Image (spheres, rainbow, N blue to C red):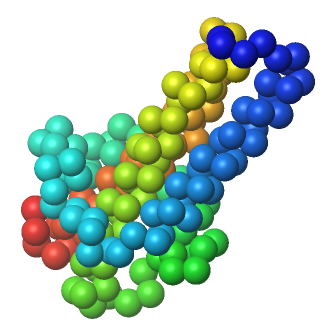
């Protein structure tokens, strides 16, 4: 901890920082053209252990809870709502596929902000923020990867 603050200020700063980070990243990422998000890039590709997304269903029961997550992309102009498939054409599915990588990357970037919290939090506060960051972002990453795997299968792009 580089800056010592009273606990009330730490809690307020943590809440505001996460709000700015999460919404700021979501807004920023909606500004980047979809063509820049290649769902088949080395960073986005699925690993063999994911079993074309079936591992997420088996180990996390993703299908049961995925629809309960918020979709901040729909809060911003230019965002791509992912709550439901509006159209079932291959072009729409390819666009949705790109958006799964955009969404996943947004949540990974949010997790990368965690070291910032060590500036004003004691060790236990950093641990609390780590738990929050994982709880808030990891389910979204799982859903994006699960959906990307499903779309790759449908489009026969495994």
Q: Nearer the viewer, residue 83 or 55?
A: 83
Give the image quarter of residue 158.
Answer: bottom left
What residue is at 44 percent from the left and 87 percent from the top? 86
Residue 33 visible at all: yes
* Residue drawn at (75%, 42%) of the image: 16
User: Residue 134 at what x, y percent from top left?
Assistant: 52, 33
Query: Percent x, y for residue 140?
Result: 48, 50
- The mark tally for this picture is 0
Q: Is residue 110 above or below residue 126?
A: below
Q: In the image, is 62 to the left or to the right of 56?
A: right
x%, y% of residue 66? 50, 56
The part of the image, by quadrant, that contains residue 23 is: bottom right
Q: Is residue 136 above or below residue 155?
A: above
Q: Which sits in the foreground, 52 or 144?
A: 144
Residue 133 in percent (x, y) is at 56, 34
Left or right of 15 in this view: 105: left
Q: Is residue 63 left or right of residue 35?
A: right
Residue 62 visible, this orientation? no
Q: Is residue 43 left or right of residue 58?
A: left
- Going 87% across and 16% down the picture, which residue do you hit? 6
Question: Viewer-proximal residue, 67 or 133?
Answer: 133
Quarter of the image for the N terminus: give it.
Answer: top right
């Amino acid at each position: 901890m580089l800056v010592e603050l009273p606990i009330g200020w730490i809690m307020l700063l943590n809440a505001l920082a996460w709000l700015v980070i999460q919404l700021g990243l979501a807004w920023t990422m909606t500004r980047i053209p979809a063509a820049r998000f290649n769902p088949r890039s080395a960073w986005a590709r699925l690993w063999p252990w994911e079993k074309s997304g079936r591992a997420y269903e088996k180990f996390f029961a993703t299908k049961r809870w995925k629809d309960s997550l918020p979709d901040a992309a729909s809060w911003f102009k230019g965002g791509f709502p992912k709550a439901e498939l509006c159209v079932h054409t291959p072009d729409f599915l390819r666009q949705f596929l790109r958006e799964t990588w955009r969404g996943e990357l947004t949540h990974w970037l949010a997790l990368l902000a965690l070291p910032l919290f060590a500036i004003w939090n004691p060790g236990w506060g950093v641990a609390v923020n780590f738990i929050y960051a994982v709880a808030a972002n990891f389910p979204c990453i799982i859903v994006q990867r699960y959906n990307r795997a499903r779309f790759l299968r449908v489009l026969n792009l495994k």
